[in-house]
């Protein structure tokens, strides 16, 4: 589930880069959240179901 959320956040971030700087700050917050979730998943060692 965390992996899915991280992928969705990364896609939203990429869309934000394409659309411009309207929500630039918010998109970077989403990117940071996605990276943190991904790292937590790697560190915890959980395997995908």
Image (spheres, rainbow, N blue to C red):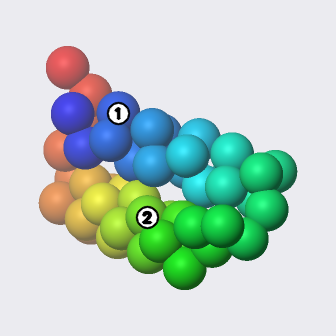
> Residue beneath label 2, please?
30
Task: Looking at the image, tell me whether mark 2 or mark 1 is earlier in sequence order.
Answer: 1
Q: Is residue 7 visible?
A: yes
Q: Nearer the viewer, residue 43 or 20?
A: 20
Q: x%, y% of residue 16?
A: 67, 55
Establish if 29 lies above or below 44.
Answer: below
> Residue beneath label 1, please?
4
Q: Residue at x 59, y 41 (%)?
A: 11
Q: x%, y% of residue 17?
A: 76, 59
Q: Residue at x 58, y 67 (%)?
A: 23
Q: x%, y% of residue 27?
A: 54, 66
Q: Nearer the viewer, residue 48 or 16?
A: 16
Can you tell which quarter of the image residue 4 is in? top left
**Left or right: where does residue 31 sit relative to residue 38?**
right
Kindly state the secondary structure of the residue where label 2 is placed.
helix
- Residue at the extreme front: 22
Can you tell which quarter of the image residue 39 is in? bottom left
Q: Residues within 10 Å of mark 2 (few under 14, many from 20)?
A: some
């Amino acid at each position: 589930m965390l992996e899915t959320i991280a992928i969705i956040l990364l896609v939203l971030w990429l869309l934000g880069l394409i659309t411009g700087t309207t929500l630039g700050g918010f998109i970077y917050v989403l990117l940071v959240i996605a990276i943190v979730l991904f790292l937590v998943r790697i560190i915890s060692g959980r395997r995908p179901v």
